[in-house]
Image (tube, coloured by chain):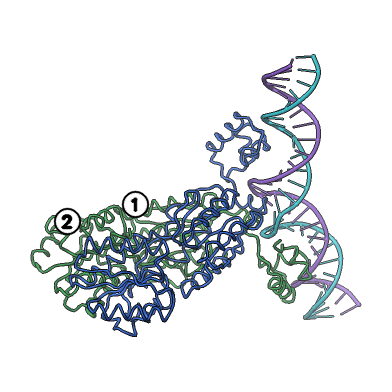
Chain colours: A blue, B green, C cyan, D purple
Amino acid sequence: MRPTAKDLAEAAGVSLATVDRVLNDRPNVSKKAARLVTEAIERIGFVRNPAAVNLARSRIYRFRFLLPMAGDQYLRELLEKVDEAREALRSDLTDVDVVQIPTTDPHAVAKYLSGLQSEEVDGIAVMAPESPQVRDAMARLIERGIKVVQFLSGQEKLKTADFVGIDNFAAGATAGKLIGRFLSHEPGKIMVIAETMMAQDSIERRLGFDSIINERFPHLCPLPSAETYGDERRASLVIQRMLEHNPQINAVYVLSAEARLPISTIAQFADLRRLTVVVHERTPFSEEALRDERIDAIIAQNPGHAVRSAIRIMRARLEAREPLASQEKIRIEILLKENL
Amino acid sequence: MRPTAKDLAEAAGVSLATVDRVLNDRPNVSKKAARLVTEAIERIGFVRNPAAVNLARSRIYRFRFLLPMAGDQYLRELLEKVDEAREALRSDLTDVDVVQIPTTDPHAVAKYLSGLQSEEVDGIAVMAPESPQVRDAMARLIERGIKVVQFLSGQEKLKTADFVGIDNFAAGATAGKLIGRFLSHEPGKIMVIAETMMAQDSIERRLGFDSIINERFPHLCPLPSAETYGDERRASLVIQRMLEHNPQINAVYVLSAEARLPISTIAQFADLRRLTVVVHERTPFSEEALRDERIDAIIAQNPGHAVRSAIRIMRARLEAREPLASQEKIRIEILLKENL
DNA sequence: CTTGCATTGAGGTGCGCACCTCAATTACAG
DNA sequence: CTGTAATTGAGGTGCGCACCTCAATGCAAG
């Protein structure tokens, strides 16, 4: 049998009460007693039974995901995964919920975060664009004991918060490498499309992309980023003009999470199958496009993994444990038609 | 507060004892009582508190990984991940251990499995090559109530066991697609190397590989599989001869998990950087080779994920739950230098 | 030595459930 | 109607720990 707290008390030569004081960081413990107990813990290999701990504490973890209001398929996917996690954790003393607010307005985000009470929630995963106000609000949340995870978004990294997501520079570089190698030695121009280049992650991806193209594939010329602002008419205009002015385009890189608008717009003016196309994020649309070879590769970060990871991290932090780094690292996945 | 069993009893209009009988499938429950309780469960949204359940049952799950005796870096990686999982689960009522036996001897594997008692272990993840004896032994284990996972190995799938690992046909196809697209339109021959072609997974990978090369890249010619049998001298002989007879070779595909021997052997006779090379499994060796561009891509299945997945599945089965399919699917990862 | 404070031990309660016993009630066959 | 079996309820115990109270002990300053 595993040693219990009682065994531990015996081994340390102290009472159960003192063991309890040490284990739970209660006051009024002499250095000597603390040492006796910690030594005994090592010696007999004592590990708290988490089931008993949770039961006794009758504690419920309340985690929240703060996600953008709008969004196309990728966001929907994400919401679904959060829901899945909620269901899976219902039985596990963990409540998960979602709040959607217009994250393009940093003021609104900051205000929401500032209003959060630790009675209301134990941890929050925030997916919002970079802004000093939001960063400040997060820092203050952390001071108040609410765990914060910077979630899949291009924030400047806080040292006191955890980050869940991919290295966007590397992701851009990966896209560049794929396009470069797929095109082989043919020279040409690459169309780069983003929803907006205001977001930190778009910028990083672009930098990574350019760096490898310049270094390894100088015969390829990446064009300036075209921005759609998520607007159909604007996308149509910008893309059509770019295609007309650059007949040498033989590749397309879509920086943003939502590939549907750019890709379906391009399809109106050019033959996708003659282009090498790389996009971000697996969605029903991008998956289908990959299957019928309108696009050649998807760079993805597994949203289900990201959601679970964020929850595990917040939980570990609350229990003052260190998260398992290797498990919590989100991989930059490359999806081809063959390994979907 | 979440409803407790007591609330449930009240809501169902029966006693706690009857609720207990229904929840734990004990005998002597009338259909009517069972119905009352299950209806009440739905109605009030009752969910058992797993902490309390585990505490009351004071049950410890004992899982075992049965792995091959020998092996190079990949196996070592795997052992490490199992160890990591063991540590992480120590506090979680779960004991994990490893047994290594010479899995090339199906007789020994079958014998070991047959000798297993359900008093000793609750579930076992078996990584061993296909053989009817082993399959039978596993089937008998399942009948005795021990959960079995076919782990990362080329077994014929049992319907009654779970499988953790990748689709090897698709993995081979992915390798083929990468090589085909990386080589672009240049014709040439592809060297295919395996430790042995006796293993089910090697065969499936080869089939997947050939199918896509034939279909999509007919200008490429995959050579017959060269087998190293893990032997240095044999590898040297076979590979040197193949390279001499086929100067048109411009790509290499290493089917097996251990790429070190084939790759370092090739390096003695040819310039790896002029070849397009795809191998399986991330190991310290393959990682370094990818970094310094001796190889071009790694097809990997995350061993840490696989280990954790196997454990989660065995656990879910023991608790008569359905594992979360989306989480337990092992992805075919493509690693380039950029997304390592 | 006394006062005041920090430290320690003993003991109890409750978390939500599994598992057990024993009596009481009900259903059913003969 | 009787006997028997099936069903139900009441109640208790323990899992390992957190959290609380109260009394007892130690220690140091004045």
Q: Is residue B132 visible?
A: no
Q: Which residue is mark 1?
A: B76
Where residue B110 sits in the image (x, y, percent)? Answer: 39, 61
Q: Give the residue displayed 63% in from the left and 36% down from the top.
A: A9
* Quadrant of residue B340 within the rendered picture: bottom left
Mark 1 surroundings within 10 Å by alpha-carbon count, few (fewer than 14), some (14 through 19), many (20 or more): few
Closest to the observer, B62 or A281: A281
Q: Pointer 2: residues within 10 angstroms few (<14), some, or many (20+)?
A: some
Residue A272: image location, x then y, percent? 30, 81
The residue singled out by tag 2 in the image is B265
Q: Residue at x 18, y 73 (%)?
A: A186
Image quadrant where residue B185 sits: bottom left
Location of residue B265 in the rendering, given as x and y in whole percent from the top left corner: 17, 56
**What residue appears at the point 48 percent right and 70 percent down from the top-left corner?**
B325
The N terminus of chain B lies in quadrant: bottom right
Q: Could you give the CA–CA distance between mark 1 and mark 2, rounded to whole angstroms?
A: 21 Å
- Camera-side residue: A272 or B22? A272
- Seen from this angle, which residue lies furthest bottom? A268
- Chain label for disc 1: B
Which type of secondary structure does the marked residue at label 1 adopt? helix
* Circle 2: element type: helix
